[in-house]
Amino acid sequence: MENFSTPVQIRWSDLDPNFHLRHSVFYDWGAVCRVEFLNKVGLTWKKMLELHIGPIIFREECIFRKEIRPDDIVTIDLKLIKAKRDFSRFTIQHEIKKEPGITSAILTVDIAWINGATRKLAVLPEEEIKMLAMSPVAENFQWAE
């Protein structure tokens, strides 16, 4: 997949007293984008429940560049910047942009999988690894050892 981007809606409750986006909303939007992407490639919540596997976050960091205000039109994308070949660990970077193409924030997330029954780190089955292999990749993408 060459790229993945989704529009996001600014709600009144997303704003702080300065009438720009609260910092925690950027993190929420990252989660929305990742779930939309997983659904698109076929790794749905239903499939994860069936496999007893779900994503966990080890690190989440946001660099804020330009404020987002109530009337801005916003999109968020998803690119893989690092991954183990079995996708047991991977790093996604989101770029949150407002029209006309202004980067408002860059969100970086380190992710792994956990088995819901054993509560131990897990590796996805081969078929689901192929699903994640369809992720859009950044120009600086690298395989992790």
Image (cartoon, grey):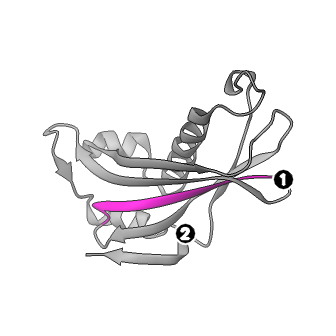
Residue 126 or residue 28, whichever sits in front? 28
Count residues near mark 2 (Cα–Cα under 10 Å), then give few for <14, some for 14-19, many for 20+.
some
Span of residues in magenta: 87-98
Residue 22 is left or right of residue 87, and the answer is: right
Above/below status of 71 relative to 58: above
Q: Residue furthest left?
A: 118
Count residues near mark 1 (Cα–Cα under 10 Å), then give few for <14, some for 14-19, many for 20+.
few
Does the magenta run of residues contain 92?
A: yes
Residue 82 screen position, x and y as percent: 40, 69
Kind of residue sitting beneath label 1: Glu
Kind of residue sitting beneath label 2: Pro
Residue 42 or residue 36, whichever sits in front? 36
Residue 81 screen position, x and y as percent: 47, 68
Identify the disc placed on residue 136: 2
Residue 123 or residue 10, whichever sits in front? 10
- Tell me what residue is drawn at x 48 percent, y 69 percent: 134
Label 2 SS: loop
Magenta portion: prevailing SS class: strand
Above/below status of 70 relative to 107: above
Badge 1 or badge 2: first in the primary sequence:
1
Does the magenta run of residues contain 124?
A: no
- Tell me what residue is drawn at x 26 percent, y 60 percent: 125
Q: Which residue is the site of mark 1?
A: 99
- Tell me what residue is drawn at x 48 percent, y 52 percent: 38
Residue 107 is left or right of residue 56, and the answer is: right
Above/below status of 30 relative to 124: above
Question: Is residue 128 visible to us here?
Answer: no
